[in-house]
């Protein structure tokens, strides 16, 4: 069919602006400023092992909290009447559409040393809390920003579960805990996997949240990369190497996770 | 399924409180007649006036709107055409094309931004050897936005193409329509809901983007998000609260409008109360899972 040719311009565009940039990242990661081949960019990364560890740990914690808070919410919302459900979905999406810098900033505003919370605590007679600058504040920022991305896919999968499947389980004598454990939960796993990718990837690579809420003391991979490209430590070769390693770790861990998820969520990755 | 009891309702309420309380505190303090972010000093609109006199904010707003509108328009047309092209591919070619199309969606935004920045900087270096001046600015920003907008359009149009009855266009041609006429009169209207939701998603992604713009806009061009970032980094200021309030209202208004349009025009949609953009985002979530969205 001649309609195939409609794909040609965009295939060219993708080659130029999607594939070529990624090839450049690989090339930069393996070269020096003078253009010679090197592995130094990777061996120099050892000094940043702590940052790698912290990034993956905090992103993992944020993802876990999002599942623990978001799964019950999605499950409860899916049980509501359709009018309420539509409203609730809009309310979940509304903050998602508001600028994410402003959402993060709202917590700076609330948690500052002389901010809203501390003033509240003071008037009640409690001591002030220095939350900003702690890893907990960074995780809080991640959860606040990305929770809707966990709720939405889980909700849309649970909503589509055929009620007859649940009735069948009940007819066969399952109590509600068994129905959940043996029917609803396994069927909702693809939604959870999709939510995990949508929360984990932006969390592990953020630099805005760590800079605003981490007070510059909790460097994450995103900060490291940003510093190599636009910051004081200008070195795009090292920056490319860090980006490449982060990309590979994320791809491998997502791939493994999907393998364990009975292969159902395979399409989440690519 | 069972109805939710009071404890469940309280849980739902608490999560919404968590999501909205910070925003409402910001809104309240945007009217505060004091620089303090804790003490109420009376009502004022000064921060809004100050905001409207802030040159960098106004310029950035202009840039943001311009780049978002242009990128959305180009991405909608290009994405729809490419989706039709991809749909007619077979086997390996199709799998490869769709996989590459998904790269900007699955990659961390910072990687997309950084890799495109490398391309533009590298191109600048190469062109400089021939005496051509090329640096990061509005054109590179626009290219970046188009690149991350197109995949959303393609993913929203694809399910509609799958639902499309291939005999429809043939029937029109049998009745004497030319290929092009049949496309615009028969095929395009069928695809429209997908195109519209793809367009809305692309627009919100462009408006909201910070990371990719940050790396591809260069030193001279700034989007609103970038100005917000530089303001937020310096210190807490009531001006930002005023800006947040306006943005919240804009998004709220947009969602209400979309929703009204939806309940007025598309009453047959079985999920009342959810706009096409909402529908689009949900079907995107499903597309990720390869669950055929809304299959008949």
Image (cartoon, coloured by chain):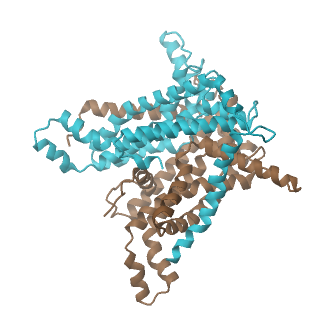
Chain colours: A cyan, B brown
**Residue at the image point whose x is 57% and y is 55% from the top:** B149
Position of residue B251 measured from the top left corner of the image (x, y, whole percent): 52, 48
Task: Say which quarter of the image contains residue A128.
Answer: top right
Position of residue A243 measured from the top left corner of the image (x, y, whole percent): 63, 38
Work out which quarter of the rendered image holds the C terminus of chain B and state it: bottom left
Nearer-the-camera pick, A85 or B163: B163
Which residue is outermost to the right? B131
Q: Decide if residue A86 is on the left or right side of residue B23.
A: left
Task: Say which quarter of the image contains residue A155.
Answer: top left
Task: Say which quarter of the image contains residue A32.
Answer: top right
Q: Decide if residue A217 is on the left or right side of residue B190.
A: right
Nearer-the-camera pick, A213 or B120: B120
**Number of numbered labels in the structure image:** 0
Q: Decide if residue A184 is on the left or right side of residue A118.
A: left
Answer above or below: position of A33 versus B175.
above
Nearer-the-camera pick, A172 or A65: A172
Answer above or below: position of A42 versus B290.
above
State whether residue A234 appears in this view. yes
Position of residue A178 measured from the top left corner of the image (x, y, whole percent): 19, 35
Work out which quarter of the rendered image holds the N terminus of chain B and state it: top left
Position of residue A173 measured from the top left corner of the image (x, y, whole percent): 10, 39
State whether residue A148 appears in this view. no
Q: Decide if residue B185 is on the left or right side of residue B221.
A: left
**Residue at the image point whose x is 45% and y is 36% from the top:** A147
């Amino acid at each position: 069919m001649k309609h195939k040719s409609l794909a040609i311009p965009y295939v060219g565009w993708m080659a130029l602006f999607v594939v070529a940039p990624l090839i450049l990242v690989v090339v930069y990661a393996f070269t020096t400023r003078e253009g010679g081949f090197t592995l130094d960019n990777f061996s120099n990364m050892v000094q940043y092992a702590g940052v790698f560890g912290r990034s993956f740990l905090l992103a993992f914690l944020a993802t876990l909290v999002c599942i623990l808070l978001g799964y019950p919410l999605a499950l409860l919302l899916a049980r509501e009447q359709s009018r309420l459900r539509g409203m609730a979905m809009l309310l979940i999406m509304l903050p998602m559409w508001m600028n994410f810098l402003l959402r993060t900033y709202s917590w700076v505003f609330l948690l500052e040393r002389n901010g809203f919370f501390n003033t509240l605590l003071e008037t009640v007679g409690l001591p002030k809390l220095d939350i900003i600058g702690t890893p907990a504040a960074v995780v809080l920022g991640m959860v606040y920003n990305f929770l809707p991305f966990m709720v939405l896919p889980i909700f849309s999968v649970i909503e589509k579960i055929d009620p007859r499947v649940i009735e069948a389980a009940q007819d066969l004598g399952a109590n509600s805990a068994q129905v959940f454990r043996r029917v609803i939960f396994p069927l909702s796993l693809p939604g959870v996997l999709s939510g995990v990718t949508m929360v984990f990837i932006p969390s592990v690579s953020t630099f805005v949240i760590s800079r605003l809420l981490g007070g510059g003391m909790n460097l994450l991979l995103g900060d490291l990369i940003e510093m190599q490209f636009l910051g004081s430590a200008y070195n795009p070769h090292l920056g490319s190497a860090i980006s490449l390693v982060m990309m590979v770790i994320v791809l491998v861990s997502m791939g493994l996770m999907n393998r364990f998820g009975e292969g159902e969520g395979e399409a989440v990755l690519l | 399924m069972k109805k939710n009891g009071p404890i469940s309702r309280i849980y739902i309420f608490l999560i919404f409180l968590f999501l909205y309380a910070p925003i409402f505190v910001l809104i309240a303090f945007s009217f505060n007649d004091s620089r303090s972010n804790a003490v109420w000093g009376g009502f004022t609109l000064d921060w809004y006036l100050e905001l409207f006199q802030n040159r960098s904010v106004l310029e950035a707003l202009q840039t943001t709107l311009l780049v978002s509108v242009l990128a959305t328009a180009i991405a909608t047309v290009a994405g729809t055409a490419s989706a039709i092209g991809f749909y007619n591919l077979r086997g390996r070619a199709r799998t490869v094309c769709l996989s590459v199309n998904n790269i900007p969606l699955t990659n961390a935004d910072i990687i997309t931004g950084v890799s495109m920045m490398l391309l533009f900087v590298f191109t600048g270096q190469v062109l400089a050897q021939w005496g051509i001046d090329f640096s990061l600015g509005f054109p590179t920003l626009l290219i970046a936005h188009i690149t991350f907008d197109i995949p959303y359009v393609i993913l929203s149009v694809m399910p509609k193409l799958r639902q499309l009855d291939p005999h429809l266009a043939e029937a029109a041609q049998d009745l004497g329509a030319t290929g092009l006429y049949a496309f615009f009169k028969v095929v395009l209207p069928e695809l429209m809901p997908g195109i519209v939701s793809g367009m809305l998603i692309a627009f919100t992604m462009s408006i909201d983007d910070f990371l990719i713009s940050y790396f591809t806009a260069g030193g001279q061009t700034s989007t609103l998000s970038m100005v917000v970032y530089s303001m937020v980094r310096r210190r807490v200021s009531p001006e930002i609260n005023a800006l947040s309030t306006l943005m919240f209202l804009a998004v709220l208004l947009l969602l209400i409008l979309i929703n009204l349009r939806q309940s007025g025009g598309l009453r047959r949609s079985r999920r009342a109360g959810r706009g096409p953009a909402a529908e689009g985002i949900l079907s995107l979530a499903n597309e990720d899972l390869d669950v055929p969205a809304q299959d008949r």
